[in-house]
Amino acid sequence: QVQFVESGGGLVQPGGSLRLSCAVSGSSVSTLFMGWYRQAPGQEREGVAAITSSSITSSGITSYADSVKGRFTISRDNAKNTVYLQMNSLKLEDTAVYYCKAVSVNSWGQGTQVTVSS
C-alpha cells in the first residue's frame, strides 16, 4: 500500500517561502507520476504541480498550474523517496491544505497546512 506523508507547512508572510516535503512509502518514488494538490476552505481540491517518473527522463518532466508557474518548483529525491514543493513569492491566495499523491493511487495523506498572512 502506497502512503504519503506531507510536512513543512506553516504560517508565512506574503512574499515568503516554504518547502513542503512528501515522504512516500510502499513504492519507489522514481517510478511514480507524482503531484502536489491543494484545497482552500470552501473550494475544490486543485492540482498545483506534477512530476513524471524517471522512466521518461531521470529528473522527470514537470508541469504547473498557471497560478503558481514561476513561483513553485516540484522536485524529487529518489534516494530519500521524497517529493518536494519549493514555494516562493507566496501570496494570500496560496493559503490551503497541501497534499501530495501519485496519480495512479486513490488514497490521500493528511496534508499540511500553509497559511499566508500578514
Image (spheres, grey):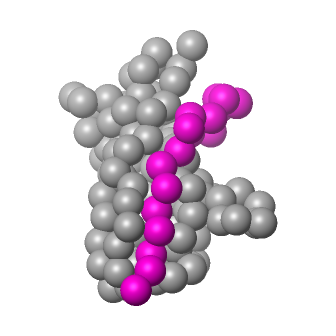
Decide whether the magenta segment is chiefly helix, strand or loop: loop
Work out whether residue 73 or residue 7 is closer to the camera in this orientation and state it.
Answer: 7
Kindly tell me whether residue 5 is visible in this rendering: yes
Percent from the top left, x then y, of residue 97? 56, 56
Percent from the top left, x then y, of residue 44? 77, 61
Query: Hey, which quadrant is residue 53 in on the image?
Result: top left
User: Taking 86 as reference, is 100 left or right?
Assistant: right
Q: Is residue 31 above or below residue 86?
A: above
User: Taking 85 as reference, is 112 left or right?
Assistant: right
Percent from the top left, x then y, of residue 115? 47, 68
Image quarter hosting the N terminus: top right
Work out whether residue 34 or residue 100 is closer to the camera in this orientation and state it.
Answer: 100
Which residue is rendered at x = 37% and y = 33% of the image? 23
Which residue is rendered at x = 38% and y = 44% of the image? 7
Which residue is rendered at x = 65% and y = 59% of the image? 39
Percent from the top left, x then y, of residue 25? 42, 20
Q: Is residue 112 above or below residue 44?
A: above
Q: How many marks?
A: 0
Q: Give the range drawn in magenta.
A: 101-118
Which residue is rendered at x = 26% and y = 39% of the image? 77
User: Taking 101 as reference, is 69 left or right?
Assistant: left
Task: Determine if the magenta segment contains residue 53.
Answer: no
User: Taking 52 as reference, is 19 left or right?
Assistant: left
Image quarter hosting the C terminus: bottom left
Work out whether residue 56 or residue 105 is closer to the camera in this orientation and state it.
Answer: 105
Q: In this view, does 99 lie above or below 29?
A: below
